[in-house]
Amino acid sequence: MSKRLEPSEIEERLAQLQGWEFVDNFIIKSFTFKDFKEAFSAMTRIAFECEKMNHHPNWENVYNTLVIKLSTHDAGGVTEKDFKLAQTIETIFTS
């Protein structure tokens, strides 16, 4: 099991991830796309990476907006796994 990070550790790590916030025991970011098809395509790309990592986000998609919430459920909070997935997601959007 992954070790849950302390709030101070989370805030330090968030400084390296633009646009991510720590809210209600999740690290969260909202993404806006051109349209629904582009948002869904991004979700599909993220889903393949999540399967590789065996770590899955809570997310919500409404038309062209995608909100991603990361927390490690079996650890009861944010762990290193969440930051690795957040960085992977950022890499997807910058490639």
Image: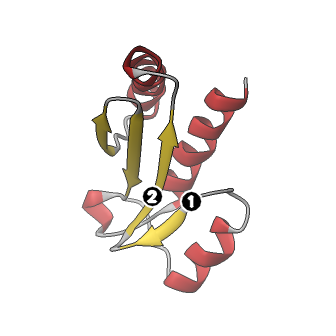
Residue 74 is left or right of residue 45, and the answer is left
Residue shown at 64% from the left, 39% from the top: 90
In this view of the protein, which residue sits in the foreground, 75 or 78? 78
Task: Say which residue appears at 42% left-offset and 61% top-offset.
Answer: 2
Give residue 36's quadrant in the image. Answer: top left
Q: Is residue 46 left or right of residue 24?
A: right
Tell me whether circle 2 and circle 1 mark residues in contact (CB < 8 Å): yes
Q: Which residue is mark 2?
A: 28
The answer to which quarter of the image holds residue 17 is bottom right
The number of numbered discs placed on residues in the rendered structure image is 2
Q: Is the residue 7 above or below the residue 76 in the image? A: below
Q: In x, y percent, where is residue 33?
A: 51, 29
- Position of residue 7 relative to residue 90, above or below, is below
Can you tell which mark lies on residue 20? 1
Q: Quadrant of the N terminus?
A: bottom left
Which amino acid, mark 2? Ile
Name which residue lies at 48% across and 71% down. 22
Horizontal and vertical percent position of residue 72: 35, 57
